[in-house]
């Protein structure tokens, strides 16, 4: 076969196996060396491809798609720094456990490590942050090679999905000429299926743990950020069977259902700030699922708590920064919760749960007052949450937005779903993550983001020109890094505004014009509330002007108020 | 001493030694964990600090400063994906040989690899792309520790400057609280000096090589992209002594002086495209300095040439993608050129040099006609070059801009200096590189850039709000990836515009408003020429509208014309 036929058959067979292994979407950044992958992905009749010029944004866009779909998404770029621009999203995918298939084009061996243009060392480019790296062979159409590279495609998808999910990286050397023949019939190698088994404790192990539960009245379940919603129902059922309250992180998926489940506790971040509360509510057994919660108060509560703490994680990564776990349970979370539920016996005593529910209800009431009475950024976030329709998706930026959602998302609101990049908690790539997510999800999708984070990934907006998207972007513009005002550093006026406040003084109306996106400026909370009532069919920016000092003051007032109310002072 | 005193003494001693080792500038991105480094750099009376919010831009901004100053520049960021955003610039610095000192803040050991927030594995984060990585100890003020970490600072600067220059990475674990005491007297450890020796061949080695030169009439010198201007004069002197023409890459530094040096050949890219010319001008000895030239025609000429080829590189990286070198000379370039000059004897025969000069002059004339007569993007670049004042600096973007400068920079223009990111030839980070460079250089600085590359690093513009900068930005807006129109892929209309053309349809006037930068829209070449006559005292954008097809056609016409002229057809 000719070079061109070899290239075409090899790459199209690889892509077909990738598709058969569950990769239904690809995000492509322009480049020459990546031509074979780009053309043949674009030409594939079932794979949905999106072009995204800035590779940093492209990778976060794919991350959003992968989060939303639960399936691996491929990203394709050319050689050189293009691949280095993927790094922030690869790191986020690694820690947030999102399946990404990174496909980088490279020079062939004879153009490596000898100063060829746009050639960098791409082997193991992402180091330990890729779960798997493989340097592909040069294109050949020998059936042995095709079967082998087909297995690599299947293995890449399987590895990206195995617990803990994450990014894998395949590097493709291509020789010129680079154009495949789109008119060729594809050679199809035999396809490979993969069956993933889940980790599961045996009956003896479960009964030892169940015995502890049966002996423990003061038990707690902590549901941290979860990669998927599969465990939500099992955890709710376990809490009903045990009578243990569930402290539900906003990213656990459980708060969506709290209106129907009184045992779900959502205001712990507010009332556990007080050390007296930490002691009063100290538990003899904590059963923790998912990643570390957003709430620092909860982390401190866990560190202070001297009882048993079980950490269930199929990914077996011992995510326990306070080193307080007494047992690491390396099992699938949903399977474990169901197993434990089925063997727990006896009717739970209600007094412990009622105590939590009663304290939580007091905090809830204060938070509702705060949302309606205060005018700061946090209260505006509350107004946003109250306005979200049933089935909506909300992507929250890091720093203040996710914390304000944690505070303000209380019982009584419509059922919405929350997303955030909590692998490495970066303020980067958030716009693209939300856009990728909204390109997959049916329901209305909102993004809540600060001005610095919005600025960081402003380039992400370019795709809205190419692909229809109805993301509603709410920018809380406090002109700088709002979260730093809560730190001890804020007490030192010298250099603070230069190094931490960093006011960019951006009017995002100009950015909206650059990307031809609908835009609305909101000077006040009520102005914002009114703007929220009409949902735009297109991507839209609502910019809300807030004040960092007012925000810090109002938050501290709220926490003080809640501390007083719950302790009866 | 208290935690705070330890922290202050440790970090300020480190920074003082860094300063003593030649680090006069630092670029800081906001974050909490990096507080000790940020505060104490900001408070240092001699170190010039700039804050740059987007770490990707920040690192390229520092890269521009380091290129312009020839001294290492420090970059500081917090933990997590912030550090991953440095990666593209770290890769560019590695291959372009630019000294960067990357200082990342990290969690202490007890918060690593256990799911702590914003904690990622930062050890060896940049893999082989950092010349050196070191994980710093926790802050202590014991004199042994201070002396040791002082040595680390000196060693980091020394390693970044040793040939080949490049980035080094130090990772700092910090425990809370993070604020240093700015009122403390700094503890100063004894400072360390470093003397860098240059690699130099001995007399016997030189005389063997000089003998070959003395026996060779048809010799050529190739001056590729250079990291510094030190070798320029030595190479010019060598060419005079040998009578060998010097093919001067636009980034070699030699073209700046070509008006006074008739042996400098600058139009080779145009006339060596023709294989008949490659054969006619084939040399018996090629002496090559610097990185691989921008010109693909020259690379092909080198590959086809069967004579001896010497590659001089103090960095010893064998930058020879055509594997055509017959001798690798691992010596300092300036030293080698001077040594060889001093021992070369005899008066050079002029006929070989005259042949080159004559052919080159014909191409020069055609290029001048092209600049004045054509209306395409390349001709507009020529107009820009003709307008540059003496002592100006021009930063050229990758893809088309650097190639158009290569074509259009001919004898007779004012003396300007050219810069580009040719380590990995990326279109990313170019705006920030130019801004960093212009913050250091006295003379007027221009940036020539395409619309995709401008878009990619639009965030770089934010610093112009904080620090006065008079960069004159010329955007050649051909609405997409202009260089792809020259590739074979352009012959396939299906998917081409989607995957390669990728028209972003951006009006950069809105970006100028967002960042409060002066802006001028130029519809035609003459419109543009007129706008160039008044230099703005502030940063300014000149957007020139061009057409990709017209551009390809005009370039091809020029090359055909030159091929005909030089061959006498």
Image: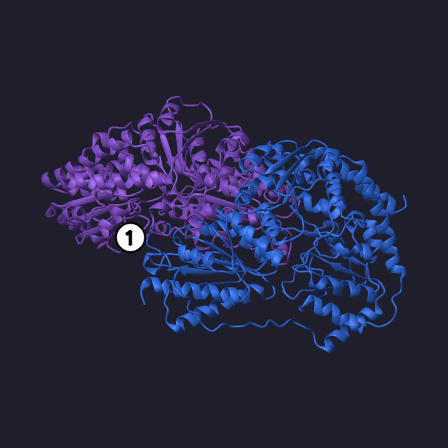
Chain colours: A blue, B purple
Q: Residue at x 24, y 49 (%)?
A: B201
**Chain for numbered disc 1:** B
Q: In which quadrant will I find the N terminus of chain A?
A: bottom left
Q: Residue at x 40, y 59 (%)?
A: A182
Residue at the extreme top of the image, as rendered: B534
B385 on left or right of B201: right
Residue B434 x/y as whole percent:
43, 35
In the image, is residue A458 above or below residue A254? Answer: above
In the image, is residue A16 above or below residue A373? Answer: below
Residue linked to disc 1: B320
Residue at the extreme bottom of the image, as rendered: A204
Is residue A31 visible in the rendered image? The answer is: yes
Q: Residue at x 32, y 54 (%)?
A: A114
Front residue of B176/B365: it is: B365
Q: Quadrant of residue A564?
A: top right
Residue A212 x/y as whole percent:
80, 70
Which structural element holds mark 1? loop
């Amino acid at each position: 076969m000719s070079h061109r036929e070899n290239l075409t058959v090899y790459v199209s067979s690889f892509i077909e196996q990738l598709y058969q292994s569950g990769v239904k979407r690809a995000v492509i950044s322009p480049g020459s060396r990546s031509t074979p992958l780009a053309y043949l992905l674009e030409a594939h009749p079932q794979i949905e491809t999106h072009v995204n010029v800035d590779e940093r944004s492209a990778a976060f866009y794919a991350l959003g798609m992968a989060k939303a779909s639960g399936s691996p998404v491929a990203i394709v770029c050319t050689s050189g720094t293009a691949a280095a621009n993927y790094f922030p999203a690869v790191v986020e995918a690694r820690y947030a456990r999102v399946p990404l298939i990174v496909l980088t084009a490279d020079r062939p061996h004879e153009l490596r490590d000898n100063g060829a243009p746009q050639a960098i060392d791409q082997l193991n480019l992402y180091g330990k942050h890729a779960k798997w790296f493989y340097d592909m062979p040069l294109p050949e159409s020998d059936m042995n090679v095709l079967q082998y590279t087909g297995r690599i495609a299947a293995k890449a998808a399987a590895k990206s999905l195995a617990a803990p999910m994450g990014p894998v990286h395949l590097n493709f050397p291509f020789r010129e000429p680079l154009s495949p023949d789109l008119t060729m019939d594809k050679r199809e190698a035999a396809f490979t299926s993969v069956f993933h088994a889940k980790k599961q404790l045996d009956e003896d192990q479960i009964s030892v743990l169940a015995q502890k539960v049966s002996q423990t009245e003061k038990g707690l379940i902590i549901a941290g950020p979860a990669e998927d919603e599969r465990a939500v129902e099992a955890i709710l059922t376990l809490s009903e069977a045990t009578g243990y309250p569930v402290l539900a992180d906003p990213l656990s998926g459980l708060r969506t259902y709290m209106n129907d489940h009184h045992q779900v506790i959502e205001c712990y971040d507010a009332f556990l700030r007080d050390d007296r509360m930490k002691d009063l509510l100290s538990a003899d057994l904590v059963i923790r699922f998912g990643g570390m919660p957003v709430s620092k108060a909860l982390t401190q509560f866990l560190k202070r708590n001297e009882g048993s703490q079980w950490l269930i994680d199929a990914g077996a990564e011992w995510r326990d920064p306070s080193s307080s776990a007494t047992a690491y349970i390396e099992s699938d979370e949903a399977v474990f919760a169901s197993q434990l539920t089925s063997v727990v016996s006896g009717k739970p005593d209600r007094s412990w749960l009622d105590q939590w529910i009663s304290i939580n209800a007091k905090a809830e009431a204060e938070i509702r007052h705060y949302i309606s009475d205060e005018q700061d950024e946090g209260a505006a976030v509350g107004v946003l949450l109250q306005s979200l329709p049933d089935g909506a998706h909300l992507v929250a930026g890091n720093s203040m937005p996710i914390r304000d959602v944690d505070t303000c998302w209380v019982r009584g609101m419509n059922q919405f779903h929350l997303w955030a990049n909590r692998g490495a908690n970066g303020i980067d790539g958030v716009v693209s993550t939300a856009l990728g997510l909204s390109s997959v999800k049916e329901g209305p999708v909102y993004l809540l983001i600060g001005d610095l984070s919005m600025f960081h990934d402003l380039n992400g907006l370019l795709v809205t020109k190419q692909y229809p998207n109805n993301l509603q972007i709410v920018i809380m513009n406090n002109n700088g890094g709002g979260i730093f005002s809560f730190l001890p550093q804020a007490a030192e006026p010298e250099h603070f505004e230069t190094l931490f406040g960093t006011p960019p003084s951006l009017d995002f109306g100009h950015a909206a014009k650059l990307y031809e996106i609908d835009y609305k400026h909101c000077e006040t909370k009520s102005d914002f509330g009114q703007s929220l009532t009409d949902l735009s069919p297109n991507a839209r920016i609502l910019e809300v002007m807030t004040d960092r000092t007012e925000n810090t003051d109002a938050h501290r007032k709220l926490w003080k108020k809640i501390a007083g109310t719950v302790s009866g002072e």
